Image (cartoon, grey):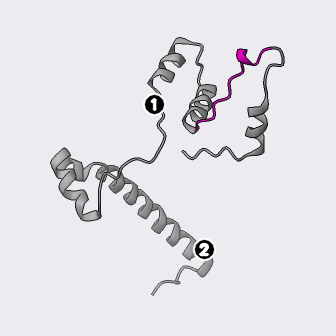
Amino acid sequence: AVVSTQSTGYLAFLRKRIRTNPKKGPFHFRAPSKILWRTVRGMLPHKLKRGAEALDRLKVFEGVATRQYNSLVDVYPKTLKSDGNGGLYRGFVISFVFIFVYRGFYFGLYDTLKSMFLGPDAGF
């Protein structure tokens, strides 16, 4: 996720303080990781046990991750070494099912619309 602190709404939010004692909050985090953490906390029921556990499992990092693969040629040996042959075919079945359904729908719709708009003898 990309977090930008340039929006005017967020800058106004950062200026809000309690007038009597600013040490009592609300605390406005400046680090992008903490901004994202607080945003996700607002989406969770963090006062309940399940929400607190989910928030404890949340890990937010700053910076850019290192590259796992250097090139497309590098992908296959590393995948074979870590996952074996199954790693190369992971996701193949659902991809095949989607292509089969998509092609069937496309050609069925194409033939139906072709006969509707161009007439029954529109083929070659």
Q: Is residue 84 visible?
A: no
> What residue appears at the point 61 percent right and 34 percent down from the top-left corner?
35
Q: Toward which corner of the image does residue 5 lie, by quadrant?
A: top right
Q: Name the outermost residue toward the bottom.
A: 124
Q: Give the main secondary structure of the magenta stretch.
A: loop
> What residue appears at the point 79 percent right and 28 percent down from the top-left corner?
16
* Residue 91 horizontal/vertical position (percent): 31, 49
Residue 78 vertical placement versus 44 (above, below): below
- The magenta stretch spans which residues? 21-31
**In what element is the residue under mark 2?**
helix
Q: Nearer the viewer, residue 119 or 74?
A: 74
**In what element is the residue under mark 1?**
loop
* Residue 88 horizontal/vertical position (percent): 23, 53
Q: Nearer the viewer, residue 43 or 34?
A: 34
Q: Nearer the viewer, residue 35 or 116?
A: 35
Q: Name the outermost residue toward the right.
A: 19
> What residue appears at the point 78 percent right and 32 percent down from the top-left corner?
15
Name the kind of residue labelled 1 in the image.
Answer: Lys
* Residue 65 horizontal/vertical position (percent): 40, 47
At label 2, counting other C-alpha atoms closer than 10 Å, the crowd grade (few under 14, some 14-19, many 20 or more) is few
In-image side of 85 versus 97 (left or right): left
Name the kind of residue labelled 2 in the image.
Answer: Met
Residue located beneath label 1 in the image: 59
Q: Nearer the viewer, residue 35 or 113?
A: 35
In-image side of 46 versus 87 (left or right): right
Q: Which comes sooner in the sequence, label 1 or label 2?
A: 1
In-image side of 9 versus 58 (left or right): right
* Residue 83 horizontal/vertical position (percent): 19, 45
> What residue appears at the point 71 percent right and 17 percent down from the top-left corner?
23
Residue located beneath label 2 in the image: 116
At label 1, counting other C-alpha atoms closer than 10 Å, the crowd grade (few under 14, some 14-19, many 20 or more) is few
Location of the N terminus by quadrant is top right
